[in-house]
Image (cartoon, rainbow, N blue to C red):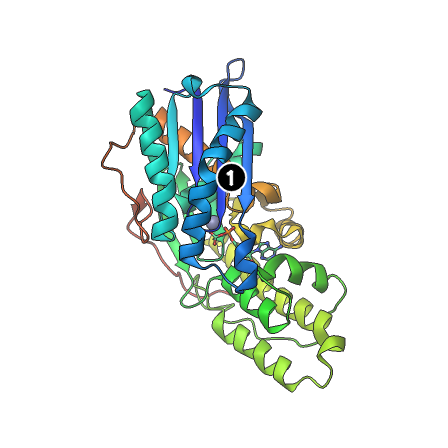
Amino acid sequence: MADVVLGIETSCDETSAAVLVRDRSRNRPELAGLVILSQDVHQVFGGVVPELASRAHLRAIGPVVDRALAEAGLPLEAVDAIAVTAGPGLLGALLVGVCYGKALAAAGGKNLIGVHHIEGHLFAAALEDSDLAPPFVGLIVSGGHTLLLDVPEWGRYRLLGETLDDAAGEAFDKVGSMLGLGFPGGPAIERLAAQGRDRFKFPRPMINEGLDFSFSGLKTAVLYAVRDSKDLEADKADLAHSFQAAAFDVLMAKAVAALDHTGYNTVVLGGGVACSRTLARLMSERLKPHARVAVASPRLNADNAAMIARAGWFHVERGETSDHYLDAHPNMPLPGLEPATRSPAPRAT
Ligand code: KG4
Ligand code: ZN
């Protein structure tokens, strides 16, 4: 058991630390401090440069952890356990957090728990909705992953579907760069799309074919439309809107199909793409009145250490800890993943 968990996240280009403290009256974790430092150096290159990310994490990790503790008003001595992202992600970036977390744990005699980044995203909604409980369908949409999970209980996951090519966020980033919107593309596309309409009617790949996803054909369709545009400035908002509408239609159709397949009535949406208020609104409208969407506020859906601390909290409560051999794993498998019941027969949505 732990009353104070320090979370550390360095898997990609955010250096983040968070402090979760047990609210004794309600016996649940409350977020007491959270610092997220986004590395802007990558904007120059239009994508994350791994070596630059590691170096920036190294410079930032100490001050970011200190600041999160200061926000919580707690000294390091008060921390019982340290939860750190151990994978998946960029090896050099992960190593900074893992080494820092291990050193703090070893020096202070604290528990250590290595956390899977995607399990962290799945726990994000639980930070603000403490009553959120399985069973539910988990839809994690980030820059690196698009995963549809059957979650019968916390810590047990069955893969229902995943992307066969690009992740949803990756498609947003690539389309963002085609439209000259900078990196990352998602937030800029969402803003621009608000001024456009679905004029291009892009394909919705695999929308009625099982629970796997494919986004590369949609991306190519946008590329052709950009290439064929006579006036890109004038078409931009409609291109952004049309792309976003196609991507979100697919995500929503798969969520509905997964609800049908499992018989559950809750979808937990997480990952960077879930920062989109548009997606959260559209999905909740689409699922009403039969099912609901649980989604955290944008700050907790982008990469952050609060979600890592929350997933770590769960494991520590179950008596699970890592030892000092904890290592960074760029392709870490999701813990608790059970044999799949994948891609049921296609259905019309
Ligand atoms: O989870 P995340 O912060 O990092 C990874 O673990 O990959 O996800 C980042 C992704 C980027 O691809 C970014 O474009 C996307 O999330 N994203 C969005 C929005 N905000 C961030 N995509 C669509 N709409 C948004 N508002
Ligand atoms: Zn992420």
Given residues 16 and 288, the one toward you in this image is 16
- Viewport quadrant of the C terminus: bottom right
Helix, strand or loop under label 1: helix
Which residue corresponds to the image point at 55% horizontal and 19% vertical from the top-left?
A: 73
Given residues 183 and 162, the one toward you in this image is 183
Which residue corresponds to the image point at 47% horizontal and 19% vertical from the top-left?
A: 75
Given residues 235 and 199, the one toward you in this image is 235
Q: Residue furthest top?
A: 25
Residue 129 to residue 40: above or below: above
Which quadrant contains ligand 1?
Answer: bottom right
Q: Position of residue 325 (x, y in %)?
A: 22, 37
Q: Which amino acid type is shown beneath numbered disc 1?
A: Ala
Q: Position of residue 192 (x, y in %)?
A: 71, 63
Q: Position of residue 191 (x, y in %)?
A: 71, 59
Residue 100 to residue 28: above or below: below
Mark 1, residue position: 124
Q: Residues within 10 Å of mark 1 (few under 14, many from 20)?
A: many
Which residue corresponds to the image point at 49% horizontal and 39% vertical from the top-left?
A: 16
Q: Residue furthest left?
A: 325
Q: Position of residue 227 (x, y in %)?
A: 62, 84
